[in-house]
């Protein structure tokens, strides 16, 4: 083993590392067991999928943060800072915009409708085929994203994860949320340990900052309006805001969490607290990436052949700088696993909810509560095996971060356009909605898949220079300095490769949203039929002057929608109430 930051092989796990890792898994699993025994007397579908709708803001907010930012952030974001600099830090603006819109417009909609599946709205507003299509798109997106979440695929590891999932899902959504809280704390602790140890090695955070400045990693504000540039101020703030809005406003994994809150006030507050959690998470991840660059500025592990992909950089760094502290590398790997498990657990619980509500419930109407509960648990095990298996055989789509966000943009963008079409335009109908959704999805898949087959050139992605001048061992004696790290490019590049296929992946969601709305409105105007009959509409101001709610269902008075009131709207909810027609309009 050579000096830190000079390349070569690194240490492997010690006994204490395995002990720490196993301890984290055991503690996480014990939460599932506790919630399972605690809720045994209230074993209902609502209890399993929505936590009885009695959750409070802070744990739900931490779960919202962990569910999507976890596995992606631990592995992908530090590598982003190492290779491309801190422009990704500008997502802080996107998180603020996304949180405000989601909390003030989308949360009241889903909360008042008293639904379990976010895609029930599509049937209420348009038609059942559109609801089924929306649910199918969500399931495809979730499975695709889980395929990008990389984890070691040793048989023992996968077995432990499957056992963990089985125990956890005995406790339902409550267990998932409280486990997410633990996993988020471990994940943030892992970042702090990496930053602290790196600062000690480099002689302080000031030196880390100076190295990052000299390496061009701190030039974050680039106002180039070119939509083909991978990351600029405009692509991150404009494109990123709509992309994250499509995730947090209509994605079942997120909707299922904030509608589990006991009041509308708690549901809104969970998104604002989540915004703070996202800012802390991305800041620690970026600082970890800058620390990694400071240590490896003269010996890039990728160019030196020490790691195969950028997603292996941070685990390599951990084993390089923390091997002298037995158990600490195990804690970081536990943090990485916690991120993966959190993302997987969020996906599984949401997949179970939409499968039961959108596919099975309309067909199997005579099932008892106990049968539904066993069906939920069985589906949890099935989707858990599928998601973990796909994570174990993750494809090499390039950066795990960009791959995941690209998938969200390609599918969630058109879905967001579909929801906005129904919420903001009263004259839109089911024919227009279906036409818009199919058109938007086809175009985003076209550009998204094309960008994977023919990646943008370095002139658009602008990776920063790396070096191997300080390595003790290189793949080739001629390696001294590596001009920017690049992804492999195809031998043949069609004419669209440098224009259409080079569109920034952050613009996939805005593009899909805009196409869906525009096409949907045009077709609706041509067909001229409204999707719903006359409705009894009650106007109500819910901090958003543009929101009008149809309240043909049992609803608590406005004064009860506060931080302290019980969620009376869901306490005695009747199944027939869910068949009432509800929609929103401008």
Image: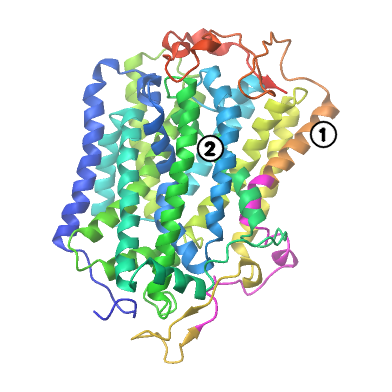
* Magenta-tinted stretch: 482-510
Give left or right: position of 139 versus 527.
Answer: left
Whether residue 261 sits left or right of residue 172 in the image: it is right
- Quick one: label 2, few (<14), some, or many (20+) residues within 10 Å? many
Tag 2–tag 1 contact (CB < 8 Å): no
Badge nearest the viewer, 2 or 1: 2
Residue 516 lies in the magenta-colored region: no
Magenta-colored stretch includes residue 507 = yes
Q: Secondary structure at mark 1?
A: helix
Q: Residue furthest left?
A: 15
Residue denoted by label 2: 248
| Coordinates of residue 241 in the picture (x, y in percent) | 61, 45
Q: Which residue is mark 1?
A: 522
Front-most of residues 112 and 359 = 112
Q: Position of residue 97 (x, y in %)?
A: 59, 41
Magenta stretch: dominant secondary structure: loop
Q: Give the CA distance from mark 2 to mark 1.
A: 28 Å
Q: In the current view of this chain or complex, which residue is farthest to the bottom?
A: 477
Please identify the quarter of the rendering in which residue 331 is found: bottom left
Q: Which residue shows up at 39% across the image and 38% down it?
A: 62
Any part of residue 394 in sight:
no
Which residue lies at the image location 51% right of the left edge and 63% below the top edge? 398
331 shown above or below 575: below
């Amino acid at each position: 083993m050579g000096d830190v930051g000079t390349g070569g092989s690194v240490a492997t796990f010690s006994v204490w590392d395995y002990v720490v890792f196993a301890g984290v898994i055991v503690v996480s699993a014990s939460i599932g067991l506790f919630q399972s025994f605690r809720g045994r007397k209230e074993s209902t579908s609502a209890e399993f999928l929505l936590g009885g709708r009695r959750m409070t803001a802070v744990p739900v907010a931490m779960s919202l943060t962990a569910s999507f930012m976890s596995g992606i952030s631990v592995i992908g974001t530090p590598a982003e800072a190492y290779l491309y600099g801190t422009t990704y830090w500008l997502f802080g603006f996107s998180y603020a915009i996304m949180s405000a819109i989601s909390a003030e417009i989308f949360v009241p909609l889903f909360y008042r409708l008293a639904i379990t599946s976010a895609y029930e709205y599509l049937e209420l507003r348009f038609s059942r085929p559109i609801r089924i299509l929306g649910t199918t798109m969500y399931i495809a997106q979730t499975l695709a994203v889980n395929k990008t979440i990389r984890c070691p695929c040793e048989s023992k590891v996968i077995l432990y994860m499957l056992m963990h999932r089985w125990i956890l899902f005995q406790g339902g959504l409550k267990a998932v949320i409280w486990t997410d809280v633990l996993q988020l704390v471990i994940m943030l602790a892992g970042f702090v340990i990496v930053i602290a140890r790196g600062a000690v090695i480099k002689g302080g955070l000031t030196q880390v900052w100076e190295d990052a400045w000299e390496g061009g990693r701190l030039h974050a504000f680039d106002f180039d309006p070119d939509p083909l540039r991978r990351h600029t101020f405009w692509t991150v703030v404009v494109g990123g805001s709509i992309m994250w809005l499509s995730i947090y406003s209509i994605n079942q994994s997120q909707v299922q969490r904030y509608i589990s809150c006991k009041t509308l006030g708690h549901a809104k507050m969970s998104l604002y607290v989540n915004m703070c959690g996202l800012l802390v998470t991305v800041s620690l991840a970026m600082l970890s990436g800058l620390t990694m660059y400071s240590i490896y500025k003269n010996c890039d592990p990728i160019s030196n052949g020490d790691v195969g992909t950028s997603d292996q950089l941070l685990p390599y760094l951990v084993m390089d700088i923390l091997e002298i502290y037995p158990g600490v590398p195990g804690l970081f790997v536990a943090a990485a696993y916690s991120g993966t498990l959190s993302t997987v657990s969020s996906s599984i619980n949401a997949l179970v909810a939409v499968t039961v509500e959108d596919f099975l419930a309309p067909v199997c109407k005579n099932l008892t509560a106990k049968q539904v509960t066993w069906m939920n648990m069985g589906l949890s095990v099935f989707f858990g095996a599928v998601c973990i298996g796909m994570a174990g055989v993750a494809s090499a789509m390039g950066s795990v971060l960009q791959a995941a966000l690209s998938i969200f943009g390609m599918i969630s963008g058109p879905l967001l356009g579909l929801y906005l079409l129904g919420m903001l335009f009263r004259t839109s109908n089911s024919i227009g909605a279906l036409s818009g959704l199919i058109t938007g999805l086809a175009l985003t898949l076209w550009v998204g898949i094309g960008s994977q087959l023919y990646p943008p050139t370095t002139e658009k992605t602008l990776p920063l220079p790396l070096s191997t001048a300080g390595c003790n061992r290189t793949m080739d004696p001629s390696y001294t300095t590596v001009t920017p790290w690049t992804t492999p490019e195809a031998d043949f590049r069609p004419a669209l490769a440098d224009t259409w296929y080079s569109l920034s992946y952050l613009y996939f969601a805005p593009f899909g949203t805009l196409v869906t709305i525009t096409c949907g409105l045009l077709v609706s105007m041509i067909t001229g039929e409204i999707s719903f009959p006359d409705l009894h509409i009650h106007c109500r101001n819910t901090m958003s002057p543009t929101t009008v709610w149809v309240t043909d269902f049992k609803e608590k008075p406005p004064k009860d929608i506060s931080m302290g009131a019980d969620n009376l709207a869901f306490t005695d909810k009747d199944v027939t109430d869910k068949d009432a027609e509800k929609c929103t309009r401008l």
